[in-house]
Image: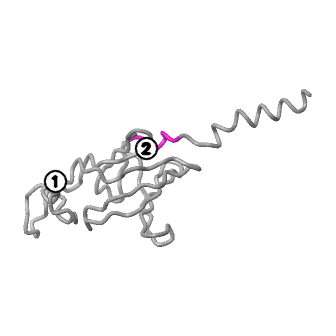
Amino acid sequence: MRGVLVPVLLVLLSIPLLAGDADAILGIWSTPENKSKVEIYKCGDKYCGKITDLKEKVYPADDKDAGKTKVDRKNPDKSKHSDPVLGLELMKDFKFKNNVWQSGTIYDPEKGKTYRCKVKLDGGKLNVRGYVGIPTLGRTSIWTRAE
């Protein structure tokens, strides 16, 4: 009996470790080339993310809106064209399952498009994969935890 009890206890104790920590994604992340910082937070029982900092907060000199604060001007919803990009919620409705945050969407304000998305923590990096239809038809962006 004792020989069976020890392995069973070890398996039961390791289940939380195998399941991963759903909240490990929480915090502020830098996108590639530090273009922006995104805070990932809990929104109910799901996970969301918003832009908390931008490398370039205003449009460059060669833009028609040079010097003005960046807004969501490419959003397909014209009523949002004057919304600032800083503070924009771009990640919505992620659920944690099998060590992946999935079933969410990510919005790209540079293109004005929303994609299905899944996120996986790989060491200290976040693999953010936006896609259309199936994950194979997508692109992965590597985010790092901001200091």
Q: Residues within 10 Å of mark 1 (few under 14, many from 20)?
A: some
Indicate the position of residue 76 as horizontal and vertical percent values. 22, 66
Q: Start and end of the magenta stretch?
A: 22-27
**Left or right: where does residue 49 sit relative to residue 11?**
left
Q: Is residue 26 magenta?
A: yes
- The chief SS type of the magenta part is helix
The residue depicted at 42 percent of the width and 41 percent of the height is 26
Read off the residue under disc 1. Answer: 83
Q: How is the image coloured?
A: one colour
In this rendering, is residue 30 above or below 116?
Answer: above
Q: Which mark is residue 46?
A: 2
Q: Residue furthest bottom?
A: 137
Residue at x-position 19% and y-position 59%? 72
Do the residues under discs 2 and 1 have CB atoms within 8 angstroms? Answer: no
Residue depicted at x 49% and y 67%: 135
Question: Disc 2 marks which amino acid?
Answer: Lys
